[in-house]
Image (cartoon, coloured by chain):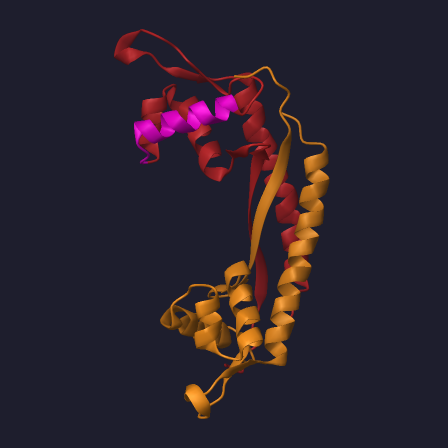
Chain colours: A orange, B red
Amino acid sequence: MSSVLKKYSVGFRIWISEEHGHFIGLGRVRLLENIKKTGSITKGAKAMKMSYRQAWQMVEDMNSRSEKPLVEKILGGKGGGGAVLTETGEKAIKLFYRLDEKVMKLSNELSKTLKL
Amino acid sequence: MSSVLKKYSVGFRIWISEEHGHFIGLGRVRLLENIKKTGSITKGAKAMKMSYRQAWQMVEDMNSRSEKPLVEKILGGKGGGGAVLTETGEKAIKLFYRLDEKVMKLSNELSKTLKL
């Protein structure tokens, strides 16, 4: 109830769904980036204060909602094996950011003329 | 890790922010609609299983983030007075849906060509 002129903007969040449920949003994209960076699901999860169990379930879920896996586990080796981001994983990250940017452009455009 | 062809779509959520914080999203729009329908914050809140306290705080917050109030309380009368949606409140609802529709059009468009 202030008489000060108010300035508004449009905020948004996007995600990609597969026919039967959530596929990826910003949280999962961050996890994929962390797995890529650390070469491990455990370390990737720790970097974002996520439990290994939760991260592992997310990876399983993403893989099952894709024609090809996004993350591949490497068995054995020191520390119980790592994980790598596949080409499909890389594509998924890029796809998410490309879509996010398109919606951001529209929301910036809409914000310019926002008036109540 | 299925070989079945997957179909993806873009999901989204939008909201309107004022310079200092959240102004309205779908939850608050629904509350405004319920206040309009019932003529009361208490009844409007009950219709969506929200506590009166939470609804009242939302109304106060929305009003403070607008040049003119969205909801006006009517003192007295049977049952302790009601509330009405102002012209600004009506405008806020329409604005939200207009923006939501524009983002929906884009997300539908983007969903058509979505391929991983």
Residue B7 rendering spot, x and y as whole percentages: 57, 68
Nearer to us in this view, B92 or A40: A40
Q: Give the range drawn in magenta.
A: B49-64
Residue B116 visible, this angle: no
The part of the image, by quadrant, that contains residue B75 is top left
Q: Is residue B85 left or right of residue B48?
A: right
Residue B76 visible, this angle: yes
Give the vertical position of A27 relative to A105 (above or below). below
Nearer to us in this view, B109 or A64: A64
Residue A112 rendering spot, x and y as whole percentages: 72, 35
Q: Is the magenta stretch mostly helix, strand or loop?
A: helix
Residue A10 rendering spot, x and y as whole percentages: 62, 39
Furthest residue toward front: A78
| Quarter of the figure with the C terminus of chain B | bottom right
The part of the image, by quadrant, that contains residue B81 is top left
Verify whether residue B62 appears in magenta.
Answer: yes
